[in-house]
Image (spheres, grey):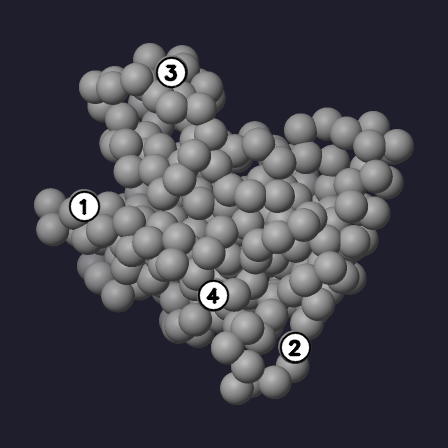
C-alpha cells in the first residue's frame, strides 16, 4: 500500500488530484523495513507496535516521540504558508485501536465502539468485541488523577492502545490548532486521534471541520461526543484521508461564498422584507 500511495494509485491519490491538494506519505512505524523511496517521509518510531492484548502498545516516550514527529510535519507546512490541513492513515487493525481509545476516553461500552473494519463477518465481529473487551479489562482503569499511570490520562491511553500513526496524528492536530490552521478531520481512526489531542487541549476541536460520517460503527457516536455535524455522509470506511480530500471542494465553495458573493445591497437587489 505504501508503494501504491507513492506511485499515485490509491484512492486518496485520485481524490487529492481531483481536489488539487498536496499529498504527503509518512512512515510512522511500519513493521517491515522499507527501502529508501523518493517522496516518502520516513520517520518510523519503531518497527510496529506491541500487542496491547498483553502489554501497552508503546512506551510513553514512544508516544511522545510520535506526537512530536507529527507536530513537526505540520509546522513544516505551516511555515510554507499552508492554512488548511487534513490527516489520514493506513494501518492494520487500527479500527481496534481506535475503538479502545474511544471506549476509554469517551466512557462508552466497547460493544458500541467496535465495527467490522475492513469487512468482518458476524463471527469475526463477535470475536473482535471479546478480544478488545478483554484488553480493556487487562489494562484496568485507575481513577486517581495523581496516579502517573492513570489509564484515563490521554497520553497513557494513547500509549496503551494507540498506533504510531494515531499518535502522530494526535500531535499533528495539536500543532495545527496552535498554528490556527483549519483542520479537516477524516473518519473513525483520524477522529480517535482527535479524541486524544482534544483531551490534552480541549480547544483543538474549535479548529476542526468534520469531513464525513464513516460507515464504521462508533463514528457517529464519536461525532456526537464532539458536537459535530459532518459535511458528508457517504457510508465510506476507506480511511487514507479520503473523506478529508472529498471535503476540500466544499470548503473552497464556502470560502467563495464569503469572499465573492454579492450582498443584496451591493448587487442592487431589493430585500423581500423591505
Task: Point out the tag, 1 or 4, that comes first from the N-terminus.
Answer: 1
Q: Which mark is residue 205?
A: none
> Secondary structure beneath disc 3?
helix
Of tags 2 and 1, the one toward the viewer is 2
Whole-angstrom CA distance, mark 3 to mark 2, is: 42 Å
* Residue located beneath label 3 in the image: 3
Residue that appears at 68% across and 62% down: 139
Q: Residues within 10 Å of mark 1 (few under 14, many from 20)?
A: some
Residue that appears at 40% across and 40% down: 46
Task: Point out the tag, 3 or 2, that comes first from the N-terminus.
Answer: 3
Residue 51 position, x and y percent, is 62, 43
Task: Point out the tag, 3 or 4, that comes first from the N-terminus.
Answer: 3
Image side of residue 55 versus residue 47, left or right? right
* Residue located beneath label 2 in the image: 142
Q: Which mark is residue 155?
A: 4
Residue sitting nearer the eye, 136 or 182: 136
Image side of residue 260 versus residue 11, left or right? left
Residue that appears at 40% across and 15% down: 4
Residue 208 position, x and y percent, is 41, 58
Residue 146 position, x and y percent, is 52, 86
Of tags 3 and 4, the one toward the viewer is 4
Residue sitting nearer the eye, 269 or 81: 81
Let me know if residue 217 appears in the view: yes
Amino acid at each position: 500500500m505504501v508503494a501504491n500511495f507513492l506511485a499515485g494509485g490509491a484512492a486518496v491519490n485520485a481524490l487529492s488530484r481531483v481536489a488539487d491538494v498536496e499529498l504527503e506519505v509518512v512512515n510512522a512505524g511500519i513493521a517491515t523495513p522499507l527501502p529508501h523511496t523518493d517522496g516518502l517521509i520516513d520517520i518510523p518510531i519503531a518497527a510496529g507496535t506491541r500487542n496491547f492484548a498483553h502489554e501497552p502498545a508503546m512506551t510513553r516516550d514512544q508516544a511522545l516521540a510520535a506526537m512530536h514527529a507529527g507536530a513537526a510535519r505540520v509546522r513544516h507546512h505551516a511555515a510554507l504558508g499552508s492554512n488548511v490541513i487534513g490527516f489520514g492513515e493506513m494501518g492494520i487493525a487500527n479500527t481496534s485501536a481506535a475503538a479502545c481509545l474511544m471506549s476509554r476516553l469517551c466512557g462508552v461500552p466497547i460493544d458500541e465502539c467496535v465495527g467490522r473494519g475492513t469487512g468482518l463477518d458476524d463471527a469475526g465481529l463477535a470475536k473482535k468485541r471479546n478480544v478488545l473487551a478483554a484488553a480493556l479489562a487487562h489494562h484496568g482503569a485507575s481513577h486517581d488523577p495523581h496516579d502517573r499511570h492513570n489509564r484515563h490520562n490521554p497520553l497513557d491511553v494513547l500509549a496503551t492502545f494507540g498506533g504510531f500513526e494515531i499518535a502522530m496524528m494526535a500531535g499533528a492536530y495539536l500543532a495545527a490548532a496552535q498554528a490556527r490552521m483549519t483542520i479537516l478531520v477524516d473518519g473513525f481512526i483520524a477522529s480517535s486521534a482527535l479524541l486524544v489531542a482534544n483531551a490534552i487541549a480541549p480547544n483543538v476541536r474549535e479548529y476542526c471541520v468534520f469531513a464525513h460520517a464513516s460507515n464504521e460503527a462508533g463514528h457517529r457516536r464519536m461525532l456526537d461526543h464532539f458536537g459535530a455535524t459532518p459535511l458528508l455522509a457517504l457510508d465510506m470506511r476507506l480511511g487514507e484521508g479520503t473523506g478529508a480530500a472529498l471535503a476540500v471542494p466544499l470548503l473552497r465553495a464556502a470560502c467563495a461564498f464569503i469572499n465573492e458573493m454579492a450582498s443584496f445591497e451591493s448587487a442592487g437587489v431589493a430585500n423581500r422584507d423591505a
